Image (spheres, helix red, strand yellow):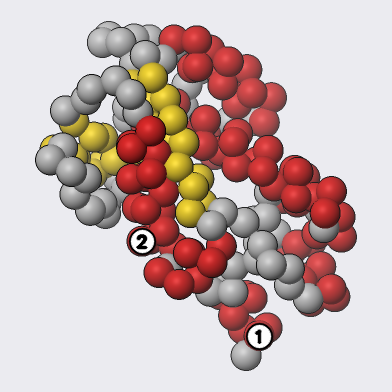
Amino acid sequence: GPVVSCSVIFPKKIKIKEINDSKLLSKNKRLKLEKIIKEKAIDYSFGIANVEEIDKINILNASILSMHRSLSQIKKDFDLILVDGNRFKNYKDKKHICIVKGDSKYVSIAAASILAKVYRDKIMTNLADKYPEYSFEKNSGYGTKEHLLAIQKYGITPIHRKSFSPIHKILN
């Protein structure tokens, strides 16, 4: 499936209890926090890079592309970008800081991670209707044992990333 990025601008000194790295939260907790984040954010937006883009330019560059797309949708002016991770390419004239494990250190990064995960999970759940044998509603397209077995049994779909190592091995 696609890579989804999110940008969030909060008021200064915001505190939202329970916000953390999206990977450490249950699906129900993420859905609860999604509503709170959207209510308290000054602005938020999403950016997507599709499977074809991921396979063409690689996952890192596609992630940066989706981040840039997300930033381009922000209507409120900003002067600093906090990036979760260690790589980013300049966006316009904006200063950026890369922060490894930023989603466990900054509430805005954690909030963006939660919104992006919820958004992507919804995309994958919708794709589960079209491709039921892959259980996207359960695995969100991640390389679980069940998902990899389904790929071996049924092959790949147009939404599978051909550059993803297990799929690349199957194709070659």
Q: Which amino acid does label 2 sit on?
A: Asn
Question: Label 2 belongs to which residue?
Answer: 61
- Using the image, determine if residue 134 lies above or below residue 95: below
Q: Is mark 2 on a helix, strand or loop?
A: helix
Q: In which quarter of the image is residue 170?
A: bottom right
Say few, some or many: other residues with alpha carbon within 10 Å of mark 1 (under 14 / 14 to 19 / 20 or more).
few
Q: Which mark is residue 85?
A: none
Q: Which residue is drawn at 19% across and 49% down?
A: 90
Q: Residue at x 62, y 56 (%)?
A: 1
Total count of labels: 2
Q: Determine the residue positioned at 51% across, 31% down.
A: 114
Residue 158: image x %, image y %? 69, 67
Looking at the image, tell me whether mark 2 or mark 1 is earlier in sequence order. Answer: 2
Q: Mark 1 sits on what residue?
A: 171
Residue 45 screen position, x and y as percent:
44, 30
Q: Which amino acid does label 1 sit on?
A: Leu
Residue 110 visible somewhere in the drawing: no
